[in-house]
Image (tube, rainbow, N blue to C red):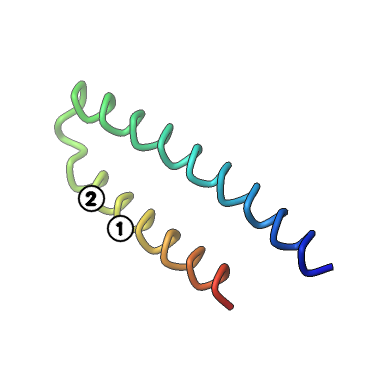
């Protein structure tokens, strides 16, 4: 049971980071075209950092 849970969490973290990387690239391209949304990008980055911290807490529980 524990091993299968570890494998599932590993797969989820892999997809989580793939999504974050794609999202980051999208944000960078978007920011290049639309410079006025700099503050919004800052908020999104803060949310991403919080989500990464939450994921870390879930993994090490």
Q: Residue at x 57, y 70 (%)?
A: 58
* Residue in front for this viewpoint, 20 or 32: 20
**Which quarter of the figure has residue 48?**
bottom left
**Which quarter of the figure has residue 31?**
top left
Local secondary structure at mark 2: helix
Q: Residue at x 21, y 38 (%)?
A: 37
* Residue in front for this viewpoint, 26 or 59: 59
**Which quarter of the figure has residue 52?**
bottom left
Percent x, y of residue 20: 44, 42
Q: Is residue 7 above or below residue 33?
A: below
Residue density around tag 1, few if under 14, some if 14–19, many if 20 or more, within 10 Å: few
Q: Residue at x 21, y 21 (%)?
A: 33
Residue 42, which numbered label? 2
Residue 46, which numbered label? 1
Percent x, y of residue 30: 28, 27
Marks counted in the figure total 2
Query: From the image, which quarter does the N terminus lie in?
Result: bottom right
Q: From this viewpoint, which residue is outermost toward the top?
A: 33
Q: Disc 1, disc 2: CB below 8 Å?
A: yes
Residue 15, which numbered label? none
Q: Is residue 35 left or right of residue 42?
A: left
């Amino acid at each position: 049971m524990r091993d299968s849970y570890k494998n599932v969490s590993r797969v989820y973290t892999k997809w989580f980071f793939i999504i974050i990387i794609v999202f980051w690239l999208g944000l960078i391209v978007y920011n290049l075209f639309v410079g006025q949304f700099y503050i919004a990008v800052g908020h999104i980055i803060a949310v991403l950092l919080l989500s990464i911290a939450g994921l870390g807490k879930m993994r090490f529980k």
